[in-house]
Image: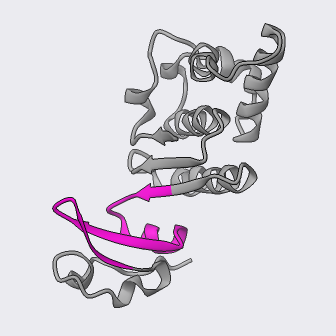
């Protein structure tokens, strides 16, 4: 299991390069030579559409944009080979355009690696457009479940029926 948190600026270690942190993530699963492990890190960064993955591997977190940082987090967490990925508000610190790009990368990576995804968000229109099933929680308990497309018909008064659930217009 792996987890992607809200803001990569707080999730990534500011005194370690992306490659150092990714190596640390893979420490238990690492096989092959050091050169092969470095090549795999660059491959992982290329897979999440980092334009210059070699440079990205040598970068420190403060040298990355928010979207690049979140893509690095996706690469690190998916690269570790989890069967389940938890994404806690993975786009809340990003603007709308970058959010959509990061979600496309996340979707591509979980499909490629056949990984299950638990997507945590308060953004119900985003949930409707990105998820298959929804569990609405209140006070740490699931109070309602439905398919994402049926979220507009959900009945919980505090969350879904209060009018905060509208589909995204594309």
Res 32 → quadrant: top right
Model colouring:
one colour
141 in relation to 151, above or below: above
Residue 163 x %, y %: 25, 83
> Residue 95: horizontal and vertical position, in percent?
45, 51
- Residue 15 is situated, as x and y percent measured from the top left of the image, at 46, 9
Res 90 seen here: no
Report the residue at 47% width, 78% height from top.
148
Is 11 or 134 nearer to us in this picture? 134
- Residue 134 on the magenta span: yes
Location of residue 96 in the rendering, given as x and y in whole percent from the top left corner:
48, 57
Q: Residue at 37% of width from left, 81% of height from top?
A: 166
Residue nearest the observer in this picture, 113 or 125 = 113
In the displayed structure image, the side of residue 71 where residue 61 appears, left or right: left
Instruction: Decide if residue 117 is on the left or right side of residue 134.
Output: right
For the C terminus, the image quarter is bottom right
**Above or below, comparing residue 141 to residue 62 in the picture:** below
Position of 80 with respect to 143 (left or right) is right
Which is nearer the eye, 123 or 66? 123
Identify the image quadrant of residue 56: top right
- Magenta highlight range: 118-145
Q: Residue at x 48, y 73 (%)?
A: 133
Q: Is residue 66 in view from this perspective?
A: yes
In the foreground, 25 or 16: 25
Whether 25 is among the magenta residues is no
Q: Residue furthest bottom?
A: 153
How many numbered badges does the structure rendering display?
0
Which residue occupies 47% across, 76% down? 168
Q: Is residue 29 above or below residue 35?
A: below
């Amino acid at each position: 299991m792996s987890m992607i948190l809200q803001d990569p600026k707080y999730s990534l270690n500011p005194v370690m390069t992306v490659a150092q942190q990714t190596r640390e993530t893979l420490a238990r699963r690492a096989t092959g030579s050091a050169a092969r492990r470095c090549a795999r890190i660059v491959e992982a960064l290329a897979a999440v559409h980092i334009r210059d993955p070699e440079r990205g591997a040598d970068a420190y977190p403060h040298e990355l944009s928010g979207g690049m940082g979140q893509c690095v987090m996706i690469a690190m967490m998916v690269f570790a080979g989890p069967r389940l990925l938890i994404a806690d508000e993975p786009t809340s610190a990003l603007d709308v355009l970058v959010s959509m790009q990061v979600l496309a990368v996340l979707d591509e990576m979980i499909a490629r690696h056949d990984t299950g995804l638990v997507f945590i968000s308060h953004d119900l229109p985003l949930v409707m457009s990105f998820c298959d099933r929804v569990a609405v929680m209140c006070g740490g308990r699931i109070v309602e479940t439905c398919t994402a497309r049926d979220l507009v018909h959900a009945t919980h008064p505090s969350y879904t029926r209060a009018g905060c659930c509208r589909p995204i217009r594309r």
